[in-house]
Image: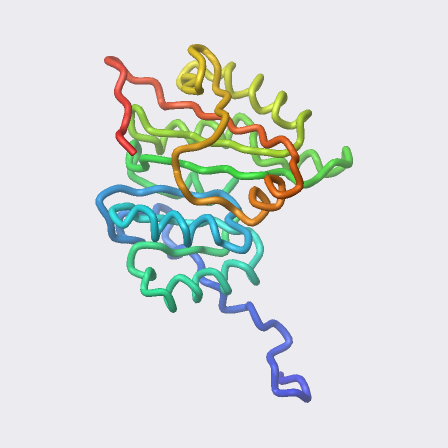
Amino acid sequence: MQLPSGRSPRPYEQAPRLPAAERVDVRSLVAGEWIEIEIGPGRGWFLVERAEAEPRAALIGLEIRRKWASIVDARLAQRGLGSRCRVFAEDARHALSRLVPDASVRRIFLSFPDPWWKKRHQKRLVVGDRFLDEVVRLLVPGGDFFVQTDVDDRARAYEERINAEPRLVAAGDAEGSPRLLDHPYVARSPRERRAIADGLPIHRMLWRRATNPARSFVY
């Protein structure tokens, strides 16, 4: 059925989705020397800037809102980035478990997550045991898990929870801490830029998938 204006009543019904298979090979989704995933890219400018700054990287965004998944995926294609950077309308809490193979992703970015405060919304929070298990499974040894937030309480909660995961090692500015003054990825999300402009503190944290011997990537 069409609205009188000719618009579909569900304009984002055809938002890009992952293939319907039970297991989805991330290497079939984008092309590049390595794969990076952003959880919740929102309006997508971090992905755009990251793709432009690092032409070797293949990037996948998992965005729960169909509107923004559609808009950002189209924007990437219009900029000629569609072959190595895609956004899919998926809930990362469920989508990550479908992605294979293990140890296939170099970096996972999680910026300003969990905008829910009421107790009844706690089940919607991203950072939980199952989520971290999937992060660890997908990261290559030495791969990055980068988290940032402008909410002090959330930062402390993330730091405590992720520090308790022995397969993720703090890799911040000071030994034994995940905290970073800034990050090395060049790209910034609109929320990060607003926080910087408003003089708000941003809590940036980095962990790496444990490996023996230790291995880091050159940015």
- Image coordinates of residue 202 in percent, x first then y, are 59, 32
Residue at 62%, 22% in the rendered image: 157
Q: Quadrant of the C terminus?
A: top left
- Image coordinates of residue 82 in percent, x first then y, are 33, 61
Q: How many marks?
A: 0
Is residue 156 shown above or below 138? above
Is residue 148 shown above or below 20? above
Relative side of 67 to 123, left or right:
left
Relative side of 19 to 132, left or right:
left
| In front of the other: 174 or 82 | 174
- Snapshot quadrant of residue 166: top left
Relative side of 82 to 148, left or right:
left
Is residue 219 shown above or below 40? above
Is residue 59 shown above or below 79? above
- Image coordinates of residue 45 in percent, x first then y, are 48, 53
Residue at 68%, 88% in the rendered image: 4
Residue at 45%, 38% in the rendered image: 109
Q: Quadrant of the N terminus?
A: bottom right
Residue at 34%, 18% in the rendered image: 210
Which of the colour schemes (rainbow, by chain, secondary structure, one colour) is used? Answer: rainbow
| In front of the other: 55 or 140 | 55
